[in-house]
Image (cartoon, rainbow, N blue to C red):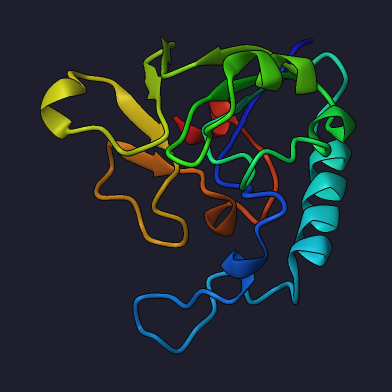
């Protein structure tokens, strides 16, 4: 049976994100890892331990920093990318790297998937699954933040977010 997973804000190859601090100014955003190399290796390991070859994964943006897409082919599953504010490559590059589909948002099964949290007036009765705000809590019960810092750096089943 095909399962559907979501994840956001991996920021592969982004060395500086491991130096960023949270809004309190005292805690690192990604304290679990010392460097991008360490964080990237662990995120790839967790992804591949969770996702099967036939599963679908929606990456909700900010997959990498710059144009280094080398890790994408290492990730299991049928990958779809919803473009984030740091995803600057041409769509063809994302497809060549291993994303089967590239889009701006996806709506289905009572959810709307996007990179940034959408304005509540545009949601209707949908639940917004998003990234972009990293370690911060979602705004309210109609939002689910799947930035890697909130989901233990591991893709989560879409069904578990209902």
| Residue at (28, 21) in percent of width and height | 126
Classify 42 as above or below 119.
below
Which sits in the foreground, 74 or 69?
69
In this view, which residue lies farthest toward the bottom?
26
Q: Nearer the viewer, residue 66 or 1?
A: 66
At 56% across and 26% down in the image, what residue appears? 159
Query: Percent x, y for residue 6?
Result: 59, 31
Answer with the quarter of the image where residue 74 lies.
Answer: top right
The location of residue 57, given as percent across then percent down, is 67, 24
**In the rendered view of the protein, which quadrant contains the N terminus?**
top right
Residue at position x 85%, y 24% in the image: 52
Q: Whole-percent x and y of residue 148?
A: 59, 51
In the picture shown, does residue 16 fall above or below 92? below
Whether residue 157 is visible, yes or no, is yes
Q: Is residue 34 left or right of 103 when viewed as pictured?
A: right
Kindly tell me whether residue 98 is visible in this rendering.
Answer: no
Task: Name which quarter of the figure residue 32 lies in.
Answer: bottom right
Camera-nearest residue between 113 and 125:
113
| 76 relative position to 91: left or right | right
Looking at the picture, how far across and down is residue 26, in whole percent? 45, 89
Where is the C terminus found, in terms of image quarters? top left
Residue 71 sits above or below residue 5 on the image: below
Q: Quadrant of residue 4?
A: top right
């Amino acid at each position: 049976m095909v399962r559907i997973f979501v994840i956001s804000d991996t920021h592969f190859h982004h060395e500086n994100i491991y130096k960023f601090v949270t809004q309190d100014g005292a805690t690192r955003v990604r304290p679990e890892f010392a460097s991008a190399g360490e964080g990237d290796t662990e995120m790839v390991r967790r992804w591949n331990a969770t996702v099967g070859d036939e599963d679908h994964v929606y990456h909700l943006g900010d997959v990498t920093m710059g144009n280094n897409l080398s890790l994408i082919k290492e990730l299991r599953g049928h990958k779809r990318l919803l473009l984030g504010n740091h995803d600057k490559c041409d769509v063809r590059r994302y497809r060549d790297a291993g994303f089967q589909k590239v889009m701006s948002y996806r709506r289905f099964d009572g959810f709307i998937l996007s990179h940034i949290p959408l304005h509540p007036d545009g949601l209707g009765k949908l639940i917004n699954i998003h990234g972009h705000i990293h370690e911060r809590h979602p705004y309210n019960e109609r939002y689910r933040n799947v930035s890697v810092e909130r989901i233990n750096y591991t893709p989560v089943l879409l069904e578990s977010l209902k």
